[in-house]
Image: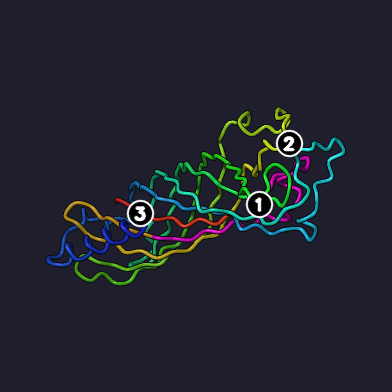
Amino acid sequence: MKLKSLLFCSCFLAVMTAKAQNWGGGIDDTDLHFGFTFQYISSEYKILKKPYWRSAFPDPERSSDIPDSLRSISSAGSPGFGIGFVVNQRINDNMDLRLTPGLVFNDRISRYDFEDGTFAGLPFERKTQTTVVELPLSLKLKSNRRNNFRAYMMGGAKLSTDISSKKKSDNSLVTDPMEKFLNNRRNFLSYEGGIGFDLYFEYFKMSPEIKLSYSMKSLLKDEAPHIYSYPIDKLMLRHVTFSLFFE
């Protein structure tokens, strides 16, 4: 619902700026310029399961509280937000190279539905809290300007580094097997692509953009298996990001 509201506001602004041609702060006349961005993010896992994912976790010190089998594993979309900067290098009238480093605050949620035991029939949720530094590098392909409007599409890759405290996700400190963390790798690469449009005002340019990103490799951390990581073969991450750039 929030994403739909943001898209509606962006379309409204596009109509409002379509009358007289604005200067835009002379942003198209410079080879190198800077800006900042605000982001709304929705993220979820794509979970690839092992062939034996439904079977019981082989724990030699098995507790009666640990369920014997799984019914399903899924991921729920989780909202987040981010802030960042823009470094834009003009290549020609219709192409820019962009570096958009940012700081993203986002939770990732996985849900387990057990068939038996204390938690049978109750979706059991594990939340991974992250604070991520992102370094996206992308190519922006722009249409010709029409009054105060340009459409564009972009594509590229980004490096993400989780700077959250390790103490908040240290499984060696957790004694209850049902309270273990589904930990992710701290560093990973993603590819991304999206569309947007530039709106020119008198002294600046604003660009609403929506993009999709997908991790290149599994995010599942290589550590001692536990009841939550044991059935998972690969843990991929998908992001939908709505951004407002100001340049």
Span highlighted in magenta in the image: 210-236
Residue visible at 33% across and 52% down?
245
How far apart are the alpha carbons under marks 1 and 3?
28 Å
Coordinates of residue 166 in the picture (x, y in percent):
63, 31
**Where residue 61 sits: x, y (%)?**
85, 35
Tell which residue pokes out farthest to the left in this image: 20
Residue under circle 3? 2
Pointer 2 residue? 177
Q: Amino acid at mark 1?
A: Asp
* Residue 50 counted in the magenta span: no
Residue at image point 24% right, 66% down: 149
Is 36 situated left or right of 107 in this image? left
**Horizontal and vertical percent for residue 32?**
35, 52
- Find residue 53 and report its image quarter: bottom right
Q: Secondary structure at mark 1?
A: strand
- Numbered mark located on residue 113 in the image: 1
